[in-house]
Amino acid sequence: MKDYPQFVSQCTDHIPESGRISCTAPSNIALVKYWGKGPVQLPKNPSISFTLNVCKTETVLKYQKKRNKSDTIEFELFFEGKPRPDFKPKVQQFFERIVSYVPCLLQYTFSIETSNTFPHSSGIASSASGMSALAYAVMQLEKLIYPELTPTDIAAKASFLARLGSGSACRSIEGPVTVWGMHTDVEGSADEVAIQFPDAIHDNFSGYRDTILLVDVGEKQVSSSVGHDLMHGHPFASQRFEQASQNITKLKEILITGDLDAFIEVVESEALTLHAMMMTSLPYFILMKPNTLSVIHKVWQYRKETGAKLCFTLDAGANVHLLYPEAEEKQVEAFIINELVAYCHKGQYICDQLGLGAVLV
């Protein structure tokens, strides 16, 4: 799989014997949703997302040079201190997809220790943060082998590698706003990597908040991969891809001008459209729960009564992301405690905000 020669490195005998790399990478929340993909992990439509800050994966990559070369990737995997053999196939697939781009991986055995700052299976994109953290760690190893690599080089290739593990992971390498997928109105955009939003973002979005209401905690009703596959042959797929492209154009202007009312309209429409696509696929799924709908109606009522700039978005699940300006934080916090906590599983919610992406610890 060497379709992108600019990301292929050559191996050398002068590599570190052993070491330890620790890094973190956050999750992200799509504003314009990516739904539908082609091989390998290429989006059917462009997407744009807020990079988060608090909800992140912490990964330690320990590496030891093999005594004898082999053609297999050898690794152990620990999640929150315990072996997780059920997680290994996804990581194995990731390594198999990236080894042609980072051939020095074959010269090592690895121990991967990973943990999340948020509950697993809480509806937050753990595959995005997990795969971006691992891809970023791999690039830190490559940086040790090739010191001439620049931060720009590392970010681009880390995003490229992360995509091969989980599509949305490519949007978590940088922040606070990233674009993934080729779009004629976004300079530098591409299907193989995510890029930072190339224009100056209006101060209205500085410090933007995302409070995640954990309406439903548990394994997803349907995996993202299955959901994406349902777009093949979907009766409304082509219209959806066109709508997403148009919304990228709209949201680009919104992020530059700071029009929060227009932001609310696009973001909420995108969230509901994502769920509409799932409800009209075959087989069909209703991923929202009754409490999801109750929260949405409460948000609409609150906005009508107060004129607040609070809005919601959803991933492919029941939990609700509340997006709002930093200036409204106290009022929204009171609203959550007084009106919305009752709809959360055991009263759980997570307060997050825009972040800057993956970092070396």
Image (spheres, rainbow, N blue to C red):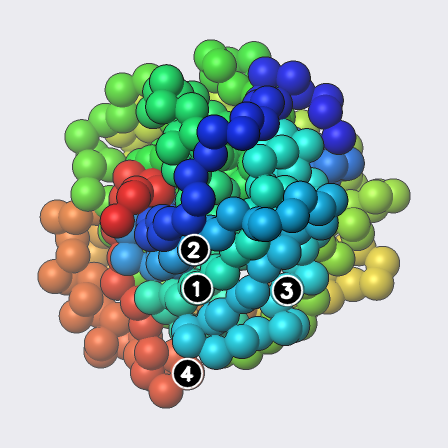
Q: Is residue 111 above or below residue 144?
A: below
* Circle 1: residue type: Glu
N-terminal-most mark, 1 or 4: 1
Determine whether label 1 and label 4 are within 8 Å by CB. Answer: no
Q: Disc 1 designates what residue?
A: 113
Label 2 vs label 3: CA separation?
Answer: 16 Å
Label 1 vs label 3: CA separation?
Answer: 12 Å
Q: Nearer the viewer, residue 335 or 63?
A: 63
Crowding near the residue tagged with mark 3, few <14, some 14–19, many ≥20 C-alpha atoms within 10 Å: some
Q: In this view of the protein, can residue 104 be seen by the observer? A: yes
Q: Is residue 69 above or below residue 321?
A: above
Crowding near the residue tagged with mark 2, few <14, some 14–19, many ≥20 C-alpha atoms within 10 Å: many
Looking at the image, is mark 4 or mark 2 nearer the viewer?
2
Q: Disc 4 designates what residue?
A: 345
N-terminal-most mark, 4 or 3: 3
Image position, residue 117 (x, y; %): 33, 66
User: At 12% from the left edge and 48% from the top edge, which residue is drawn?
Assistant: 327
Q: Disc 2 designates what residue?
A: 62
N-terminal-most mark, 2 or 1: 2
Label 4 vs label 2: CA separation?
Answer: 36 Å
Provide the secondary structure element on which disc 4 rests: helix
* Circle 2: residue type: Lys
N-terminal-most mark, 4 or 2: 2
Q: Nearer the viewer, residue 325 or 118?
A: 118
Label 4 vs label 3: CA separation?
Answer: 29 Å
Residue 88: which numbered mark, if any? 3
* Circle 3: residue type: Lys
Provide the secondary structure element on which disc 1 rests: strand
For the image, the number of numbered tags is: 4
* Circle 4: residue type: His
Determine whether label 4 and label 2 are within 8 Å by CB. Answer: no
